[in-house]
Amino acid sequence: MKVVKFGGSSLANGPQLEKVINIMQADDQRQILVVSAPGKRQADDVKVTDLLIQYAVNPQSEILQKEIYNRYWEIANYFSLPVEKFSQIDAQIKKLALTTFANSADQLAAFKAHGEKLNAMLIALIFNHLGLPAIYADPKALGILVTGTADSAQVSEFTYQNIKRFPFDDEYLIVPGFYGYTADDQIATFARGGSDITGSIMARGLKAELYENFTDVSAIYAANPNIVAHPRAISQMSYKEMRELAYAGFQVFNDEAIIPAIQGNITINVKNTNDPSAPGTLIVPDTELSIKHKITGVANSNRFAAIYLHRYLLNKEVGFTLKILQILLKYNISYEHMPSGIDDLTIILDKSQIDEQVINLAMAEIQQAVKPDILEWYEDYAIIMVVGEGMRNQVGVLTDILNALSTRNIGVKMINQGASRIAVMLGVAQADVADAVAAIYTDCTN
Ligand code: ASP
């Protein structure tokens, strides 16, 4: 059995859903269909999830209600679904506005999750209308239990036992991605792009032979195609490589979604709904990996910022880092990396979690607590992650990377190589990032 997940652009309208149905029918192992909410139909369109976020803020808005209705009705109508069958989708959109929630975080999560929920319900109706036996499987019935916050849920281990017990036969199972239920029966969503996580959870729970993840590109490429013209398609990579690359900017596959697949030893195949015969990219367990290139991919991201500290004899002071981390804890700031030198420390943070006021307060406390000679906040920070299992046993990879940059006069603000030795992280100025990625790709990936 294969678990097959389709992203928002694959489900944006009727013609796209038709491709999805054809893909499902082309292989009788494809039985579990995990869906996102309808995404953008064209570049300037709005995803249904974003419409629902607006609706959560303004539940009385009939314009938004109508807009959301129209998105689903456009799909239903393409397949000539009778309006009586569609009425349950309409009723759910209206019911959302009338429901009371314990707090605004729960309300927002429930509204957002309906993008996937209504899509899965509608797709099950369309399948049945076309004579394809299918059942809608809500995460509640499947037992997808989560902990954590309403907008950043973490799957609980009980989920996998629950999924195994879900009764079904040989019909298609249509599963909404992106959310689960808390112990108090509230909807909580995964982070944005989190339908990939549901696909991975279902694949592990059902011990699927393959998790196919359909999106709108024919493969994962070795560098951002907006920076490097025609980068190499990656035919195969390890879980670790995918995690490093996803984390540092490859948005094709959600970085958290790899974890359940790793735990279940499930191979993931990223494929294109608009080009289903292309082999796509396989993300495989280490035992199945064949290493063809020293460097698998070069990712870049602007979502990071850094706190830089300098003080002489930093290395001698016991508890210095602890004091700083206590301040970060107090302000609920998580950090991503902390490369350090004899007299310096850089703390790299995800910018999206902090606002200016919080960072100013935290910086002031750090200044008082550890009295650094230099304390700076770097907003102009871009991260480049050079990733490859093939780098582990190679001498001179770092030299090659740094040569590629220095010959083009690109300065490096920070460099960090993890103990796994399959990833090198570089910090550069945002203005240099495109040139730096192109330079590394051109000089080092062949
Ligand atoms: N619909 C959600 C989002 O836009 C989740 C997903 O598509 O995976 O983030």
Image: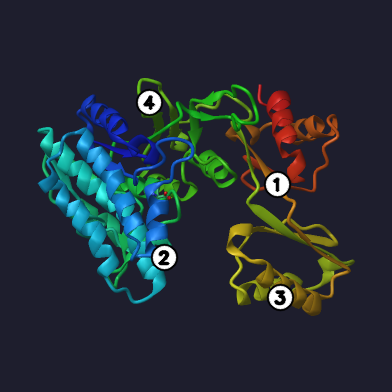
- Earlier-in-chain disc, 3 versus 4: 4
Q: Secondary structure at mark 4?
A: loop
Which residue is tagged 2? Answer: 57
| Element under disc 2 | helix
Residue 308 picture location, percent across and down: 78, 61
Classify 10 Å Cα crowding around label 1: few (below 14), some (14-19), many (20 and above): many
Q: Is residue 443 above or below residue 209?
A: above
Numbered disc 3: secondary structure: helix
The C terminus is located in which quarter?
A: top right
Q: Is residue 47 above or below residue 406?
A: below
CA neighbours of label 3 inside 10 A, class few (<14), some (14 to 19), many (20+): few
- Amino acid type indicated by mark 1: Ala
Q: Secondary structure at mark 1?
A: strand
Q: Nearer the viewer, residue 239 or 125?
A: 125
Other residues around mark 4 within 10 Å, as few (<14) / some (14–19) / many (≥20): some
Direction from residue 310 to residue 303 in the image, left or right: left
What mark, if any, has residue 137 been given in the picture? none
Q: Which residue is mark 4?
A: 274
Q: Which residue is label 1 attached to?
A: 382
Q: Residue at x 90, y 66 (%)?
A: 312
Reading the image, the residue beneath label 3 is 361
What is the C-alpha distance between the residues marked 1 and 3? 24 Å
State how far apart marks 2 and 3 are (Cα): 29 Å
Expressed as whole percent of the image width and height from the top left, the position of residue 268 reads 39, 36
The quadrant of the picture occupied by the N terminus is: top left
Query: Reading the chain from its start, which is encountered first: label 2 or label 1?
Result: 2
